Amino acid sequence: MQKPASPTPDEIRRISELITAANTVGGKAVEFSAERLKTCVAIGEQFLEWKKQVGHGKWEAFASEHFPQLPSSTRARWQQLATAKQSGRLDLSSARGLRHAYILAGIIPDTEPAPKGETEEPVSYLIHIARTQAALARIALDELAPDEAALLKERLRPIVALFYKLDADIVYTA
């Protein structure tokens, strides 16, 4: 049996260069992610100001007309990030990126799987319900556009159905 050849100096140099390139790209990605987050929050802050200026019930039409490339759900999330930052609930320096900032601000639930070898606690759904409750409490229902209200209603249907199923399965005793 022949012994495998040792890596050549050229192969070692090539891999060293690739490691340097990977680290450089990784560093730039982190910088880009932080800059993107700051930009999105700045846009959200400006949207909040304009929303006050445009007037009640006119914001969605204004925003859709002037920023059709940005979905209303994204506009709403960026405004929520700006509000979270302004209220002190969100420290931008602790966020690893936009999605992580959404999680830290309670805009979306943290759905990362448990680390390998660890099992998720059986009551973890209660944490998600609490986060959902907190997120729902921040919705200004009177400011929702009709399409946003319809989408919210549709997304809540499975929750309502689950409630009624649980309620029907409960045996009441006097």
Image (spheres, rainbow, N blue to C red):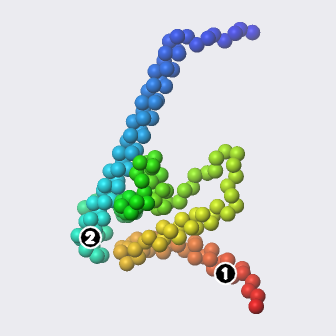
Residue at image point 58% right, 13% down: 7
Q: Quadrant of residue 65?
A: bottom left
Decide: few, some or many residues near mark 2? Use Cα within 10 Å; few <14, some 14-19, many ≥20: few
Quarter of the image that includes the N terminus: top right
Q: Which mark is residue 167?
A: 1
Of helix, strand and loop, which one carries label 1?
helix
Look at discs 1 and 2 and give the one toward the viewer.
2
Q: Position of residue 135 (x, y in %)?
A: 48, 67
Q: Position of residue 20 (x, y in %)?
A: 45, 25
Of helix, strand and loop, which one carries label 2?
helix
Tell me if I can see residue 53 in this picture.
yes
Left or right: 121, with 73 as reference point: right
In the image, residue 29 sits, relative to residue 145, either above or below, namely above
Q: Position of residue 54 (x, y in %)?
A: 24, 71
Q: Which residue is mark 2?
A: 52
Left or right: 169, with 141 as reference point: right
Residue at image point 30% right, 56% down: 43
In the image, residue 171 sits, relative to residue 10, either above or below, namely below
Question: Given the image, on which type of amino acid does mark 1 rest?
Answer: Asp
**Is 69 or 104 nearer to us in this picture?**
104
Sequence-earlier tag: 1 or 2: 2
Tell me if I can see residue 68 in this picture.
no
Residue farthest toward the left in the current orientation of the protein:
53
Decide: few, some or many residues near mark 1? Use Cα within 10 Å; few <14, some 14-19, many ≥20: few
